[in-house]
């Protein structure tokens, strides 16, 4: 069966999407029922929009099903190669980190789980290991292509070679860059996951674009991974659309943000991913601006951060915010892909 799929790569990519979506839609109701029986639910911020208080106790950690069904789809459709396995490993490890964070929130019955420095240590270990394996064993070059130009920035100029068999390179600048990209995207998607359907829909859009890029560069298994992730998000949205029956939790948001950045590294579209995932960048920047400005002036730039809450405070309905932010994601993803496509011609 697998050999038949491999003869038709376009069909293989499409099938990964369909299987992942179908499996998620089949399994999710049972998972929701289990969480309700176990009384495992979301803890809502007390200082958030008052309309969100009704979400207290809504089942969370739907990211578990997303990750498991996505993984099952990948192995059902094809035989993953080393780049895909490395992306999958980073994704699942970050998902485990998110799971620990979610469990901590439920156990302590508060909206804050692990401490920020604990998350950052774990994200650092995952991203550094990912980068070093990618460079030394998968042939990923330590440079980044600059969008809108024909130039590349060499981040391998400060490299230490350890005296192992064949040499083990540590390109310090590229390691730092990959850490910032992966940890930044993981946290940015996590910040975006604040409204019913927002993060799931946005991730679905950017993953489809990353699948197109991977397919164009001949990385079929990476494209399969991306479409499987997109399909799982679509299946999840059936239950996460307003009013949500379940949330993905940090288990899903941290893992999917990491997956997005990891695909960008493998396809050498690191800086393009910042454009493609522009919504996530905007959401993260809104929090940074709010915090820094408040510390300096004791005043706020936004009514509330992240940005989606600002528009809720202005009177937009949750559904309006989500749909308009999906449109913004589509625009960012389209522009990012267009810039990449023109530069690769």
Image (spheres, rainbow, N blue to C red):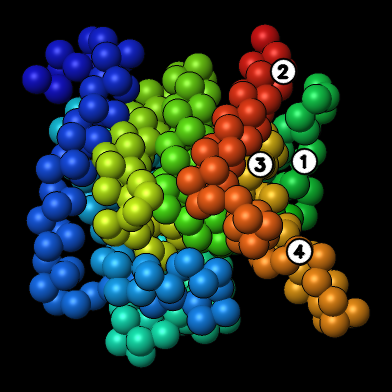
Q: Which mark is residue 40?
A: none
Q: Residue at x 41, y 65 (%)?
A: 250
Q: Nearer the viewer, residue 130 or 91?
A: 91
Q: Does residue 111 appear in this view? A: yes
Q: Position of residue 281 (x, y in %)?
A: 67, 50
- Measured along the vertical axis of the image, is residue 342 above or below residue 74? above
Viewed as shown, does residue 72 lie left or right of 244? Answer: left
Disc 1 and disc 2: Cα gap in Å?
A: 18 Å
Under circle 3, the secondary element is helix
Disc 2 and disc 4: Cα gap in Å?
A: 36 Å
Q: Residues within 10 Å of mark 1 (few under 14, many from 20)?
A: some
Q: Which residue is mark 1?
A: 154
Q: Mark 2 or mark 3, which is nearer the start of the sequence?
A: 3
Q: Position of residue 306 (x, y in %)?
A: 64, 62
Q: Nearer the viewer, residue 134 or 323?
A: 323
Q: Residues within 10 Å of mark 2 (few under 14, many from 20)?
A: some
Q: Mark 4 or mark 1, which is nearer the start of the sequence?
A: 1
Q: Residues within 10 Å of mark 4 (few under 14, many from 20)?
A: some
Q: Nearer the viewer, mark 2 or mark 4?
A: 4
Q: Which residue is mark 2?
A: 343
């Amino acid at each position: 069966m697998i050999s038949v799929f491999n003869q038709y790569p376009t069909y293989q990519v499409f099938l990964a999407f369909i299987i992942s979506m179908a499996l998620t839609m089949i399994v999710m109701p049972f998972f929701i029922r289990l969480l309700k029986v176990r009384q495992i639910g979301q803890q809502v911020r007390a200082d958030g929009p008052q309309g969100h208080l009704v979400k207290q106790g809504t089942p969370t950690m739907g990211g578990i099903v997303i990750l498991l069904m996505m993984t099952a789809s990948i192995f059902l459709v094809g035989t993953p190669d080393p780049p895909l396995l490395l992306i999958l490993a980073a994704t699942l490890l970050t998902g485990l980190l998110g799971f620990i964070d979610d469990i901590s929130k439920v156990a302590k019955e508060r909206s804050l789980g692990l401490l920020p420095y604990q998350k950052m240590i774990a994200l650092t270990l995952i991203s550094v290991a990912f980068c070093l394996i990618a460079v030394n064993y998968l042939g990923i070059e330590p440079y980044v292509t600059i969008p809108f130009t024909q130039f590349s920035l060499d981040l391998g100029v400060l490299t230490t070679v350890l005296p192992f068999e064949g040499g083990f390179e540590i390109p310090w600048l590229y390691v730092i860059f990959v850490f910032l990209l992966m940890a930044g995207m993981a946290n940015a998607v996590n910040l975006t996951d604040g409204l019913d359907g927002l993060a799931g829909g946005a991730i679905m859009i950017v993953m489809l674009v990353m699948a197109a890029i991977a397919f164009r560069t001949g990385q079929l298994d990476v494209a399969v991974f991306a479409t499987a992730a997109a399909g799982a998000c679509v299946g999840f949205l059936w239950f996460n659309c307003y009013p949500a029956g379940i949330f993905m939790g940090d288990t899903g948001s941290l893992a999917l943000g990491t997956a997005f950045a990891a695909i960008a590294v493998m396809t050498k579209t690191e800086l393009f991913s910042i454009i493609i995932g522009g919504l996530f960048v905007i959401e993260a920047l809104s929090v940074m601006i709010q915090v820094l400005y408040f510390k300096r002036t004791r005043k706020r730039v936004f009514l509330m951060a992240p940005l989606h809450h600002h528009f809720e405070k202005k009177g937009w309905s949750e559904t309006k915010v989500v749909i308009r932010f999906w449109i913004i994601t589509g625009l960012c993803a389209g522009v990012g892909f267009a810039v990449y496509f023109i530069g690769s011609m």
